[in-house]
Image (tube, grey):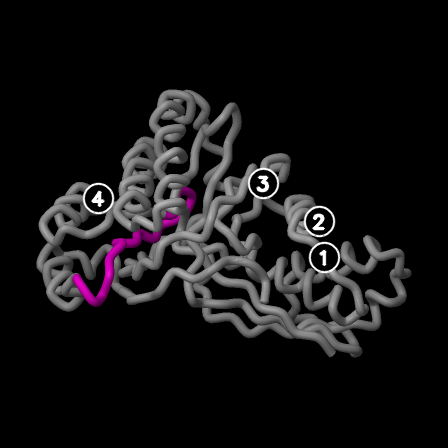
Amino acid sequence: MAEARCPASCGEFIQGWIGGSEKLVSCPIDWFSTVEVREGVPSGEERPRMRQMLEQVVAHFGYSVTVANSLSIALDSTIPVGKGLASSTADIAATAVATARHLGETLSESILAALCVNIEPTDSTIFVLPTLFSHLNARTQFSCQAAPAVDILLLESDTTILTEDYRRHQRESALFSHAAALDEAWHRLQQSCRMQDPRLLGEAATQSAVASQTLLAKPLFSQLLALVEEFDLYGLNVAHSGSVVGLMLDVRKHDAEKLLWQINRLDGDSHYPRQHLVKMVAGGVR
């Protein structure tokens, strides 16, 4: 038996047309998918993409399909599905590493990335460090220094959005029109990591979130931006292909309870009925 777990992501710090193609940098938080792989009959309750990943890892290391058929997968996850929280990436990445560990093998981050994008567009939560990642083909994997510490007030909507549905929309012209802003946001993000400056990180995320409004608008966005200014928060980030919004702050410096009260005064609980105070964490599969 072997186990692995991968964090969720509160959307992305940045996502868009960066350096000539679509890329993103995810925002990992302290929610996890934990996967256990052991000898046993596969369950009918397994998620198909997790089974697909197990079979792919078994084949990658040169084992027969008989080995894959002798392994079962168990999942324990605290990550809501279909909200832009990287639940699917967490599931398949944790499955990949748990399978490799069960076989007595190891997977590098770059190989894990390639295996994941073979199955679906993948969040950069699979990397320990903040990483600019071409989530469709894994060709770009450019890591920064560790991100500065930030708390996030995560606003969870009832709206679910499948990544496949989001990608069916014609987005090219909007992506291209914001390319300069996203290049600037990427520069700010790198600078924030070098300087350990959460304000620069918040500025980068906010810049990308503003650009994202033309692609997938979030309810109360302008009002939430006003609260960032009013409470002197670090910034605001979004799930670019999902429905969650994160307000970036430091619980030692900012009044999270008063902020929540103000959000609910705006009728925020009708748009974002579940509100969670979470911490950013390092990425990577544990």
Q: CA distance from mark 4 to mark 1?
A: 40 Å
> Is residue 243 covered in magenta?
yes
For the residues labelled 2 and 4, the Cα–Cα distance comes to 38 Å
| Quarter the N terminus occupies | bottom right
Provide the residue designation for mark 4: 221
Residue at the (36%, 54%) spot, across then down: 148
The image position of residue 272, as x and y in percent, is 25, 58
How packed is label 3: few (under 14 Cα within 10 Å), some, or many (20 or more)?
some
Label 3 is placed on what type of residue?
A: Gln
Sooner in the amino-acid sequence: mark 2 or mark 4: 2
**What is the span of residues highlighted in magenta in the rendered image?**
239-253
Residue 141 has which mark?
Answer: 3
Residue 75's place in the image compared with 211, above or below, is: below
* Dot placed on the residue nearer the N-terminal end, 1 or 3: 1
Q: Amino acid at mark 1?
A: Leu
Question: On residue 107, which mark appears?
Answer: 1
- Amino acid type at mark 4: Phe
Q: Which residue is mark 2?
A: 111
